[in-house]
Amino acid sequence: MNDIASPGSSVRQVSVRQDIVPRTFVRSQVSPDLPPPLAVGGVIGWMRDNLFSSVFTSILTLLSLLFLYLHTPDLVRWLFIDAIWSAPDGDACRAPGAGACWAYVNAKLEFFAYGSYPRDMVWRVDLTLLIGAGLAAWLLWPSAKHKAAALVLFLVVYPVIAFHLLHGLGPGLRATLSWLADLFGSKPLADVAANTLPVVGTNLWGGVFVSLLVATVGIVVSLPLGVLLALGRRSKAPVARFLCVMLIEIVRGVPLITVLFMANTMLPLFVPEQWSPDRLMRPLIGVALFASVYMAEVVRGGLQAVPKGQFEGAMALGMSWWSMMRQIILPQALTIVIPGVVNSFIALFKDTTLVAIVGIFDFLRAVDTARLDPVWAGPTSSATGYVFAATFYFVFCFGMSRYSMMMERRLTRGRSH
Amino acid sequence: MSSAPAGAASQTEPPRTPFWRADWARGALWQALLLAAFVWLMWAAIDNASVNMRARGVPTDFGFWNRPAGFDINQTLVHFTSAGSTYGRAFTVGLLNTLLVAFFGIIIASVLGFLIGVARLSRNWMVARLATIYVEVIRNTPLLLQLLFWYNAVLAPLPNPRQSLELPGNIYLNNRGLFVPEPLFGAGFDWTLWALGIAIIAYYAVKRYAARLRVETTKRLPVGAIALGLIIGLPALAFLLAGAPLSWSTPVLRGFNFNGGVRIFPEFVALLLGLSLYTAAFIAEIVRAGVLSVSHGQSEAASALGLPRGRLLRLVVIPQAMRVIIPPLTNQYLNLTKNSSLAVFIGYPDLVQVFAGTVLNQTGAAVQVISITMAVYLVISLVTSAGMNLYNRRMALAER
């Protein structure tokens, strides 16, 4: 009685009762899809959903469009179309209606990069930066091997090489070399001892490489010192905890500028006269200290996020405190805080600009000095220099933050099964 | 440690740990060494400092505090003259200038930050994108660069006073600063202030009464309308009754500069602009994270209960978001205050520029001046975080 339309036959007559003859029509073939209504799919639908979903949203969209319409053309014209790309001096840039003075940036590029570092020895800076970039790439490449070796190279070997390359052969090394030359009575070796890598005083250093130097020293020092301070703050020993808390809270409570002032004016008073640190060394100490206490707070967050069972498990295995920290707790804690660590690196990189206050010629200071050069000074040279500097800092900081996001995704992917 | 088989042997006492291998003894030894090292370091530093300071003829006391300063400060909130005022007075001027820029900076940054944070969450693609661009650009460039940009590239090329940009409301902008009309309060204006105070107290009374009324009788009072009427109406009434004792001194161009009105220095404008725009980007991210941290179920449940969107936000989402927002927001306020020390780069006379800069250079009392400066910032930080901790405790989730 209850017939079911069988596939294959398109229309079938079903008889339920003999006196009434109902007909049921069952479609047995799928009709082709219709295109979605114009208002839902496609560009128009997207615009309806995302730009004009209500009166208020529509007004906002129109206002944003108006804002873009009013400012983008001017900005593009200033940056590119009306910009002066090459000129022997600032005359073209001083003409009324001229846009950004890229010729000025081009002319000052060497100064921005190296400050007053002797031009014939700039290869030493380049080589240092190249080695540093190579090591950093090794460390940061997600799937690179032997990262522990890279870390040792970066934290221990690289600073020594960088110092000798940038500053010149240290007196100890030079004396050893000339002693060897005397011992063997070798003339070429004596030449080498006397002439390789002559000393370049830090008063000539400047530009991008000093910015990178300050940031690198801050990173290299702040990681281990920050971990130590964080461990001290979490330790059960009251003396260590008290000292660490004091240091962290005091330095975090004051602006970096006052720490730099302190490093610059008070530090030379606190040490015997003959140990008085170099003028570049003082802000480096200040920046490293400042970065360390912020790092300590980041690491402390990671230590607190490690489940208590990990500590208890390690203790149950009879591990000593140091090996528990090194093998069980810190690897987990540091993995958790990678985004925080990168964030404080970004903050540190931006903060390196403040060393200018104690007379260090970092990149921003170089830009800010170059704009006063009478050959190039003009109504747009300041803005051009700042836009160039902003682009430089943006590329570095934005790159770091994207990298940290990528690492975070990789790490959480590994952990979520 | 004994791996003896179970039985009689295990009943014997394990050998006592000699005290030099006991945990407490080792801990005490390490701590004593640490303390000794710290004390030695401190002592050596103080000893060196006193030797060095004597050798360089640097003052070691606070005697400079009461000596005449002999330099000028362009923006002073309290009376200050180069001839008669002391270094202590200069400290006060600098501190007040720091607090002034921090106060206005915090207000502007909060308003802007909340707006941008909400804009980033907007369902409007265009608005969200613009807000994201703003946040990313501002957060990824140094604050100092932004300050220099505002000061040297935006404010410095402004026209001279004769060709000032005229803004609505008799406000003039030129390379000497922003000139705004100055309110001159006549006799009887204090009545308006009293009325405002009374109105605020009355508002709280009405609010409490309305809350009680609602619990007891479920009747609602239009608290918002009453508050508006009280807080605007009462002072306005007092103002009119006293005969409108307020006049404006508008800036007028005389010769090469403006007379009358209030001159807001370009340094202040640049610093305020830079600090607020920079901090606003960070506050926007905090607000966004706070709103996103409220679980979706909360707003869905509120909609299911029939709350309209405005009340849903005000009664359900924002209170819970605030709990997440407040601690990092406090941090940003403190950061703004500390960052105001960048004033020294553009010559705004804040605490660091006046005290740790000019006074330090003139007196040479490095240790005293730097210590005082650091102590001031430390006290500001500690007081603010103590206050915010108190507030935070009130707002915290009452877990049962």
Image (cartoon, grey):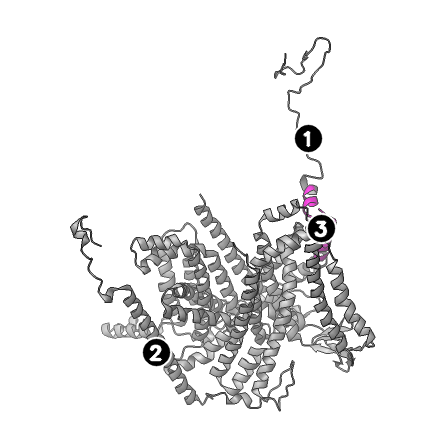
Segment colored magenta: A45-68
Which label is found at residue A57? 3
SS at mark 2 in the image = helix
What's the chain of the residue with tag 3?
Answer: A
**Which three-letter amino acid code belongs to the residue tagged 3?**
Thr
Q: CA distance from mark 1 to mark 2?
A: 86 Å
**Is residue A194 rendered to the left or right of residue B323?**
left
Residue at x-position 73% and y-position 51%: A56
**Which three-letter amino acid code belongs to the residue tagged 2?**
Trp
Query: Depth-wise, is mark 3 or mark 1 nearer the camera?
Result: 3
Q: CA distance from mark 3 to mark 2?
A: 67 Å
Return the disc, 3 or 1, that comes first in the chain's sequence.
1
Where residue A357 appears, x then y in whole percent?
Answer: 52, 75
Q: Main secondary structure of the magenta part?
A: helix
Which residue appears farthest toward the top when viewing the image?
A18
**Which three-letter amino acid code belongs to the residue tagged 1?**
Leu
Residue A364: tell me if it is visible: yes
Where residue A313 appears, x then y in whole percent?
Answer: 34, 52
Q: Which residue is mark 2?
A: B40
Q: CA distance from mark 3 to mark 1?
A: 30 Å
Mark 2 packing: few (<14 Cα in 10 Å), some, or many (20+)? Answer: few
Q: Which residue is mark 1?
A: A34
Residue A56 forms part of the magenta stretch: yes
**Is residue B99 rendered to the left or right of residue A202?**
right
Where residue A188 appears, x then y in whole percent?
Answer: 30, 71
Q: How many marks?
A: 3
Which residue appears farthest toward the left when viewing the image?
B8
